[in-house]
Image: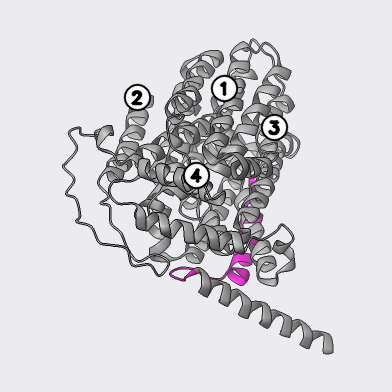
């Protein structure tokens, strides 16, 4: 019964966000010093369903956004798939006998391969279009699930996960680009929540379905999502920004007309001005290290992404069922994993609500402190369990409670705020390059965490791994206190001005120190 309750709760969370999306009124504001004409605010009738609004009432661009999130949900299924599957593969019931080392490769090789595609996919998105690249990104997912359906050996599973990784890297490079360009200013923040939410829904689906079906059946179910994405998304328009980059104004106008309701001339002119400005100030890869403010932003951003990965989140999600399986709680390991997935879904919206109210830096500091303390708690619990299992028998609730608190703390800061930071600290002409480097770096770091979690846990005990995560989290807390500027409520221009002042101050301090 628990898995039914969890799954329905997840659907309810999705529906609430969908209903919110349906009721955001359209408006026009001052943008890029162009005064846009005001329009009468439309009164949207209440939805006829308790959960889902009528899809046909959605403005066209919101329909495109919802269809885009199908591919991010697909990425979530790939990310969450190992949690119920690896325990089965390593059990006596498995038709594909798998060692612990092989299991760690099945988990981590997807993330390693995801680091290979950000740069090529960014090039393809600029050369052939965002829509075309996203459709191509669904192909590796389809191939991956088909290979798992027919798999009869571990090497086939390796290849399947490699394909999934290639798709994962494409999606998380191009999907934010496409959705950011077709969305209106009013819903761009809510949109980032919806993309994250659908990823978490994909993970939750694996926790809820995986323990009750065979591995090949689960892959068959997961295959539906990328196929559904291709069938529905192929009818969506290309981004008008892409067309204007090549001065295809008529196509850009047709695309924007399909995405908007009402007069589009002013918005089209605004987009055209933005694109022309970006094209005049095009940056290069070298500008990331040549320009002092970009260089400072880069090492701060990579430092935050290092903390994000070395706090252990990737390992906790991928190995959730194995981690819970080491305890003798009142609930089964897969039931505890379902609760974990549900908490992820419910809290992924929380940071977006708080980030513009509390600020980026306080959320990241609170997040790092919380995950550090919970990692320390888990390490201590498993240490005493390894020394004397009976000594912690009455504390069987500790791992579940600690991991749930961990997930909440991670969700409010380290999960989403680093992507806000990288979007704010770089100027437009190098933002894509910085995003690609961040994706590649994060993929490599995530691979290392997922691969070494199993290896170090087997060699030194799982408590050693959690204590290591604790140490990195607390070191990251100190790093962010010292190095990270607050960007809440500041324009891009003021953020760049603040970074320039800090660079000048740092250079002055370095010069004074060298004189002594």
User: Mark 3 vs mark 4: which is more N-terminal?
Assistant: 3
Q: Nearer the viewer, mark 1 or mark 3?
A: 1
How many C-alpha atoms fall within 10 Å of the one at disc 2: few (<14), some, or many (≥20)? few
Query: Could you tell me which quadrant the N terminus lies in?
Result: top left
Q: Secondary structure at mark 1?
A: helix
Q: Which residues are magenta?
A: 466-491
- Rounded to the nearest angstrom, the CA distance separating label 3 from label 4 is 27 Å
Task: State the mark number for residue 109.
Answer: 3
Q: Splitting the image into 4 quarters, where does residue 59 fall?
A: top left
- Rounded to the nearest angstrom, the CA distance separating label 1 from label 2 is 27 Å
Check the image and report above or below for 335 versus 422: above
Q: Secondary structure at mark 3?
A: helix
How many C-alpha atoms fall within 10 Å of the one at disc 1: few (<14), some, or many (≥20)? many
Q: Splitting the image into 4 quarters, where does residue 352 fall?
A: bottom left
Residue identifier under label 2 = 4
Residue identifier under label 4 = 178
Q: Nearer the viewer, residue 311 or 470?
A: 311
Task: State the mark number for residue 142.
Answer: 1
């Amino acid at each position: 019964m628990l898995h039914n309750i969890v799954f329905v709760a997840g659907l309810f969370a999705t529906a609430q966000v969908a209903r919110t999306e349906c009721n955001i009124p359209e408006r026009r504001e001052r943008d890029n010093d162009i005064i846009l004409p005001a329009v009468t605010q439309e009164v949207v009738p209440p939805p006829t369903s308790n959960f889902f609004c009528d899809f046909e009432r959605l403005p066209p661009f919101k329909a495109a956004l919802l269809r885009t999130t199908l591919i991010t949900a697909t990425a979530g299924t790939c990310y969450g798939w190992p949690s119920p599957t690896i325990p089965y593969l390593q059990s006596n019931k498995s038709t594909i006998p798998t060692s612990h080392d092989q299991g760690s490769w099945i988990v981590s090789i997807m993330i390693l391969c995801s680091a290979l595609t950000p740069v090529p996919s960014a090039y393809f998105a600029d050369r052939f279009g965002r829509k075309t690249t996203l459709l191509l990104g669904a192909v590796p997912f389809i191939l991956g699930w088909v290979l798992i359906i027919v798999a009869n050996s571990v090497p086939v599973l390796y290849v399947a996960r490699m394909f999934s990784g290639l798709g994962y890297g494409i999606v998380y490079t191009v999907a934010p680009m496409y959705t950011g360009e077709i969305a209106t200013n009013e819903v761009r923040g809510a949109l980032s929540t919806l993309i994250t939410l659908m990823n978490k829904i994909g993970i939750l689906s694996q926790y809820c379905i995986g323990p009750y079906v065979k591995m090949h059946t689960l892959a068959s179910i997961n295959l539906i999502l990328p196929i559904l994405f291709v069938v529905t998304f192929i009818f969506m328009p290309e981004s008008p920004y892409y067309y204007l980059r090549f001065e295809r104004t008529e196509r850009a106008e047709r695309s924007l007309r399909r995405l908007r309701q009402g007069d589009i001339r002013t918005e089209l002119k605004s987009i055209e001005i933005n694109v022309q400005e970006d094209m005049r100030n095009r940056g290069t890869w070298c500008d990331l290290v040549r320009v002092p403010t970009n260089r400072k932003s880069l090492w701060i951003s990579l430092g935050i992404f290092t903390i994000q990965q070395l706090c252990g989140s990737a390992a906790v999600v991928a190995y959730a069922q194995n981690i819970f399986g080491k305890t003798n709680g009142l609930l089964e390991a897969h039931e505890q994993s379902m609760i974990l997935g549900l908490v992820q879904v419910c809290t992924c919206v929380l940071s977006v609500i708080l980030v513009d109210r509390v600020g980026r830096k306080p959320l990241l500091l609170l997040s790092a402190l919380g995950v550090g303390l919970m990692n320390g708690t888990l390490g201590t619990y498993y240490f005493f369990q390894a020394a004397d299992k009976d000594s912690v028998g009455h504390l069987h609730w500790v791992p579940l409670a600690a991991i749930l608190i961990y997930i909440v703390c991670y969700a409010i800061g380290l999960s989403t705020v680093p992507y806000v930071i990288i979007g704010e600290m770089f100027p437009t002409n190098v933002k894509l390059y910085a995003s690609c480097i961040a994706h590649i770096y994060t993929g490599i770091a995530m691979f290392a965490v997922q691969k070494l979690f199993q290896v170090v846990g087997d060699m030194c005990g799982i408590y050693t791994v959690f204590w290591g995560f604790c140490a990195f989290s607390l070191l990251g807390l100190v790093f962010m206190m010292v190095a990270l500027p607050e960007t809440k409520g500041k324009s891009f221009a003021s953020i760049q001005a603040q970074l320039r002042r800090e660079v000048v101050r740092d250079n002055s301090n370095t010069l004074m120190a060298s004189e002594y």
